[in-house]
Amino acid sequence: MISANQLVILDRDGVINHDSDAYIKSLEEWIPYPSAIDAIAQLAQAGYTVAIATNQSGIARGYYDEATLHLMHERLTTLVEAKGGHIAHIAYCPHGPDEQCACRKPLPGLLLQIQQRLGMESIIGSWMVGDSLRDLQAGEAVGCQPVLVRTGKGEKTLANHKGLENTLVYSDLAAFADWLCKQ
């Protein structure tokens, strides 16, 4: 059984790959941070279980379809596995902000889906790594330790939001992985 403190949940856009205000709509637009791919592999090799929780409202908006999203996630999985890592589960919300779903962050539905998929009794004490306030709020709602990376929207999040004193802040996913693996 996976212990909660061994689970690292990552947001995708802005944490693992470059983000875009125009949405990541194709495999060609999905450009990973090489250091993030290495970081995921490092975490997995150190015994952490890595999962991803990502809002993908571009599907509801008609910018791309689920088949395209799956191609992006297949590429991600392939890159991570080539480095000796593993992603346990990728949970995504395809809904738009007005659809009243339970999965769109800042609601914790995606994290609860990961908990259920991995057969965990609790994810209290797990790590939630994101670049936006909604990522941190989703994690805090279920007792995860929030981690903000400065990539993607991270710098803007840090500058615009007070009350992040319980949040660990790192330059990027690689810096967080280095720190965590030394604990």
Image (tube, rainbow, N blue to C red):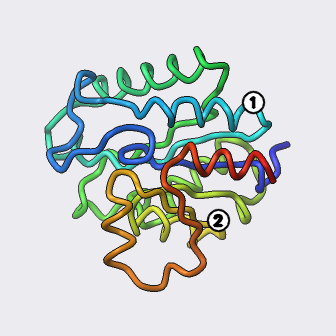
The picture quadrant where one finds residue 56 is: top left
* Residue 75 in picture, x, y percent from top left: 42, 20
In x, y percent, where is residue 35?
50, 34
Q: Position of residue 42 (x, y in %)?
A: 68, 33
For image coordinates 53% across by 48% down, the residue present is 10
**Kind of element beneath mark 1:** helix
In the picture of the structure, the residue carrying the numbered disc 1 is 45
The image shows residue 108 at horizontal and vertical percentages of 51, 63
Q: Nearer the viewer, residue 175 or 32?
A: 175
Q: Nearer the viewer, residue 86 or 122?
A: 86
In the displayed structure, 171 sits above or below 83; it is below
Q: Which is more toward the observer, 168 or 132?
A: 168
Q: Residue at x 30, y 30 (%)?
A: 30
Tell me the distance, in whole angstroms, between the alpha carbons under discs 1 and 2.
Answer: 21 Å
Q: Which numbered mark, 1 or 2, is in the foreground of this view?
A: 1
Mark 2 nearby-residue class (10 Å; few <14, some 14–19, many ≥20): many
Residue of label 2: 144
At label 1, counting other C-alpha atoms closer than 10 Å, the crowd grade (few under 14, some 14-19, many 20 or more) is some
Residue 142: which quarter of the image? Answer: bottom right
Say above or below: 116 vs 82: below
Residue plotted at (29% across, 44% down): 19
Q: Does dot 2 land on a helix, a strand or a loop? A: loop
Q: Amino acid at mark 1?
A: Gln
**Left or right: 57, with 149 as reference point:** left
In which quarter of the view is residue 69 placed?
top left
